[in-house]
Image (cartoon, rainbow, N blue to C red):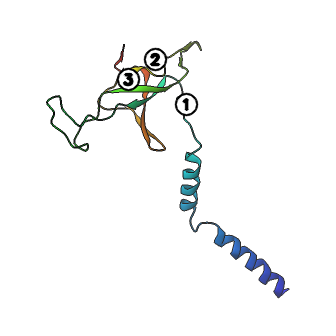
Amino acid sequence: LNERIKKILQSRTSQIHLKPKTKQSYRTKMFRTRALLRTIAPLGDRVLVRRAAKETQTAGGIIIPADNAKDPNEGEVVAVGAGERDMNGTLHAVSLLVGDKVLLPPYGGTEVKIEDDEMFLFRETEILGKFE
């Protein structure tokens, strides 16, 4: 009987050491490995936008450090949701298309990081305009 108990305890301790020590570290590792395989599709009337690169040189030729340069207020639409439903259930499609250049508000939007890309989710009503 004692030998059986020792074998059971040994097998359990070896299994315990294979797992990370805390649930937090286990969750973090799982989240990071899955992030490489994920894509994002906006829901409803949301639009995924990639902001334009920060300008580090003024029109006069003065070079500004990238940290001090302000975020540009324009971007490119990367993905678009299906649209929003009204009270009757009618689907109202989003008027923007993938690849459109848009004018963004200075603040707002939800920041989303996919791999190394930094993008923002906006509602269609939050976008100020579309460049043609």
Q: Front-most of 62 and 21?
A: 62
The location of residue 21, given as percent across then percent down, is 58, 68
Q: Earlier in the sequence, mark 2 or mark 1?
A: 1
Residue 32 on image: x %, y %: 54, 52
Q: Position of residue 112 (x, y in %)?
A: 45, 39
Which is nearer the N-term, disc 3 or disc 2? 2
Amino acid at circle 3 = Glu
SS type, badge 3: helix
Image side of residue 29 versus residue 50, left or right: right
The answer to whether the residue labelled 3 contacts the one labelled 1, judged by CB atoms less than 8 Å apart, is: no
User: Which residue position is annotated with label 1?
Assistant: 41
Q: Amino acid at mark 2?
A: Leu
Residue 55: which disc?
none
> Given this view, does label 3 or label 1 mark the residue nearer the observer?
1
User: Image height check: is 28 above or below 9?
Assistant: above
56 relative to 49 in the view: left or right: left
The secondary element bearing badge 1 is classed as loop
Which corner quadrant of the image does residue 127 belong to?
top left
Task: Specify the quadrant that holds the N terminus.
Answer: bottom right
Q: CA distance from mark 3 to mark 1?
A: 18 Å
Identify which residue, 104 or 37, lies in the foreground.
37
Q: Residues within 10 Å of mark 2 (few under 14, many from 20)?
A: some
